[in-house]
């Protein structure tokens, strides 16, 4: 078709040239040729040129469309398939990564079944404690800030309920004063600074004191005063020594405790009953012991008693709490 267009154009231009040559031969200026014939000749030449352009244009456009439409469609199809394949692979990799990550994340909650299983596992683990198998051994932790009145209330409990009172602080001071103690000076330094004595020393002293009281008096109820003072102490004691029944927590405002300690320091002779050591002990208690109280509170093992009242009123609250927990007076 393209060749036919070219040929028609050549014919048109050839006809025009032939007419002009004929005119030239008849008189150079065309005076011997009629005006009608002249117009016909010009029209014939123009039509020939027009046909040439139309035919060639259509032929070229159609040939371009035929060339471009087929191969391009064939080229785009593989690209689309590759894109879909890559998208599928990427989606699969993303889902796999999310799944693996979720498995590694810590769980923020547990089901009742998981809780019971964990509790059963802990019971089995606690069977390895120093007093495993002796169900009569009962331990109550007694916590409260310095000067809250723990010693006074523990004396009442010992008198009425047959508990042995073990004060972690008293045991440490006795060990410090023992002439042949290899930990004496170390304990003295910690007490003076108002910081916590290493856990291993305190645990060893408590376990030894419990064994001595059981062997000597047959007493198996223990009030452990001023312990645990850190989370690691609480966990280690329940793993290695015995599981506590609950925590008796004496709440008292700091200003009340400060007045009591300063008054006690006038006659106690204790090196830590001075204003500087007292302030340090307050801060240590808040920073280390309160997390222990919060921990046991979440598992329902804290009995809180306000110590802002008179000692007799405080003890009445203690008796009510013991009765609620099934602990009755021994007399």
Image: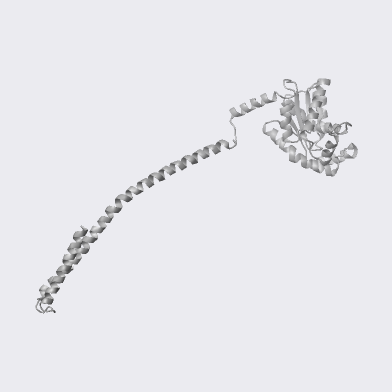
Query: Does residue 128 lie above or below 19 as drawn?
Result: above
Q: Quadrant of residue 152?
A: top right
At a point 28% along the width and 54% down the height, the residue shown is: 65
Relative horizontal placement of residue 290, taking residue 6 as reference (left or right) = right
Horizontal and vertical percent for residue 160? 81, 24
Horizontal and vertical percent for residue 46? 18, 68
Give whichever of 267, 285 is nearer the camera. Answer: 285
At a point 77% along the width and 39% down the height, the residue shown is: 285
Query: Does residue 331 lie above or below 233 as drawn?
Result: above
Relative horizontal placement of residue 78, taking residue 224 as reference (left or right) = left
Q: Is residue 331 visible?
A: no
Horizontal and vertical percent for residue 164? 81, 25
Q: Is residue 99 visible?
A: yes
Q: Which image quadrant: the N terminus? A: bottom left
Q: Quadrant of residue 318?
A: top right
Give whichever of 310, 229 is nearer the camera. Answer: 229
At a point 21% along the width and 60% down the height, the residue shown is: 55
């Amino acid at each position: 078709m393209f060749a036919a267009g070219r040929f028609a154009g050549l014919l048109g231009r050839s006809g025009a040239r032939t007419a002009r040559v004929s005119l030239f031969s008849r008189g150079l200026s065309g005076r011997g040729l009629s005006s009608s014939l002249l117009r016909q000749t010009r029209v014939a030449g123009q039509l020939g040129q027009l046909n040439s352009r139309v035919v060639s244009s259509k032929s070229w456009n159609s040939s371009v469309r035929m060339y471009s439409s087929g191969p391009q469609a064939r080229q785009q199809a593989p690209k689309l398939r590759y894109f879909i394949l890559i998208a599928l692979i990427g989606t699969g990799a993303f889902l796999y990564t999310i799944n693996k990550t979720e498995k590694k994340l810590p769980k923020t909650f547990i089901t009742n079944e998981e809780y019971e299983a964990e509790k059963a596992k802990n019971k089995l683990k606690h069977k390895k404690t120093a007093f495993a198998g002796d169900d009569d051994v009962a331990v109550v932790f007694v916590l409260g800030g310095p000067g809250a009145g723990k010693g006074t209330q523990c004396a009442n409990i010992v008198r009425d309920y047959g508990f042995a009172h073990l004060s972690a602080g008293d045991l440490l001071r006795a060990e410090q004063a023992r002439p042949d103690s290899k930990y004496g000076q170390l304990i003295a330094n910690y007490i003076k600074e108002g910081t916590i004595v290493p856990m291993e020393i305190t645990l060893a002293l408590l376990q030894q004191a419990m064994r001595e009281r059981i062997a000597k008096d047959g007493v198996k109820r223990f009030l452990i005063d001023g312990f645990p003072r850190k989370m690691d102490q609480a966990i280690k004691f329940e793993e290695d020594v015995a599981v506590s029944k609950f925590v008796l927590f004496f709440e008292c405002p700091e200003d009340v405790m400060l007045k009591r300690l300063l008054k006690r320091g006038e006659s106690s002779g204790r090196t830590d009953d001075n204003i500087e050591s007292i302030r340090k002990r307050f801060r240590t208690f808040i920073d280390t012991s309160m997390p222990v109280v919060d921990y046991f509170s979440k598992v329902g093992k804290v009995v809180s008693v306000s110590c802002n009242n008179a000692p007799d009123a405080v003890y009445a609250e203690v008796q009510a709490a013991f009765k609620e927990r099934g602990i009755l007076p021994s007399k």
